[in-house]
Image (spheres, rainbow, N blue to C red):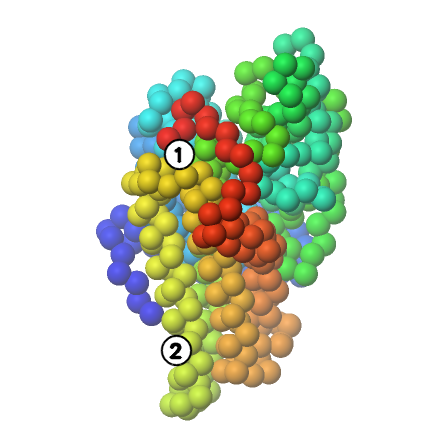
Amino acid sequence: MKQCLTDRQREFVAMAAELADRFAERAGDHDRDNDFPHENYKEMREAGFLRISLPEEFGGAGAGMAEILPAIERLAMGDGATALAVTMHISPLGQWSAVWRRTGDPKLEGFLRLAAEDKLVWAAVTSEIGTPNLMTDARTTATKVDGGYLLNGRKNFGTNTAVATHCSTTARYEDPELGPRLMLFRVALDDAAVTIHQTWDMMGMRATQSNDVEYSDLFVPDDALVHSLPIGHLDSRVAETVFAWAMPAFGAVYTGVAAGALDWATRQVVRRGTASSARVQDTIAECEILLESSRAMLHRHADEFGAGRVFTELTVQEALSRCALVKYVCTNNATQIFTKLVDAVGGASYVRKLPFERMWRDVQAGAFMPFANYAARELIGATALGIELAPVHQDQRGSAK
């Protein structure tokens, strides 16, 4: 179904479309070979796509959440793995750009200018085996030393680390005065104390190469500490930045994969002459409804969060619940679309050389990305019932209740 977009949105969607159509031609090869699409990053860099969420003052495109989400969706229509990987760069830069506009933080400005000069590519490396990736705790440890900290631990799902120069990461620090804290750091990935282990061999999203990242006495200076909060707390600043941006971005990726499959399936049934079938029309209609429901949720999220209303009208847990909701709806609608499209395309959905099969595998990852389905339902249900899941840490610069 044709979208009604603003001129700015159309500008970025057109940029993404040109890239996506080329990426689609080689997505199958990268999926088969289980390797990272480095050439896609070269083309995104040349096109300016890596800079879309950066302030125009620094040489970026100045795109906000409302412009970025449809562009990510369109990119994912061609290659979901590339879209998911680059989201780990575009989303944090969008977060920081918004914070910089509010605070004028010179340290943030330095990072944003490096990214605008294509000298910095970001990744978010917080996931660990055995811990829910809700940024309330970590198994990676931070030990205080003169001038900084030593980090030790191993992260998994290190998406975008194949090209990233830096990452954000988390570690647990036993503060002698404040008690256990979750620390958020900026880390240079070219440090000799950082090892990227080639562990990624998954069913789908293979070209993301989201390998494990290990820190072995990695020294990070004091000024690389971005934020800290008490262990086991929901945090206002994390909600306002990380989750407010990452959750809809994930949702846009999987919406885009589903939109790509729907577009492919529609062309298939038209080519085969089965478009006049009432059964086929009913199936395509169901998929269009699911897709537009996801887009509506993304649009609402960008409107509410972009204007900041969520953080003046809702509690931190309510805001996190909203973030979980948009990601949950988009990713689960996407998997439903694939299941329904099998009725329209039949055996073609099972042919390895056709793109539908790869897209079908890729979309399954949405169910367990944070917030995982069970965690999202717990958060949404508890919030609706007025049950506090965890105490709230109110950052002094945060605006949520």
Q: With 23 as the anchor, is 276 left or right in this view?
A: left
Residue at the spot x=24%, y=51% of the render?
7
* Residue situated in front as seen by the camera: 19 or 366: 366
What's under tag 1, amino acid-wise?
Lys
How far apart, in angstroms, are the residues tagged by discs 2 and 1?
Answer: 41 Å
Quadrant including the C terminus: top left
Task: Count neighbours of disc 1 (C-alpha within 10 A) and say few if under 14, some if 14 to 19, many if 20 or more.
Answer: some
Outermost residue toward the top in this view = 146
Residue at the spot x=64%, y=44% of the render?
132
Q: Position of residue 335 (x, y in %)?
A: 54, 67
Q: Which residue is mark 2?
A: 285
Q: Position of residue 381 (x, y in %)?
A: 51, 54
Relative height, residue 331 to residue 286 (above, below) = above
* Residue situated in front as seen by the camera: 115 or 338: 338
Relative height, residue 193 to residue 6 (above, below) = above
Q: Position of residue 354 (x, y in %)?
A: 58, 72
- Pointer 2 or 1: first along the chain: 2
Please give the label number shown on residue 136.
none
Q: With 258 as the anchor, is 153 left or right in this view?
A: right
Quick one: SS at disc 1? loop
Q: With 301 as the anchor, is 357 left or right in this view?
A: right
* Residue situated in front as seen by the camera: 328 or 277: 328
Q: Which residue is mark 1?
A: 401
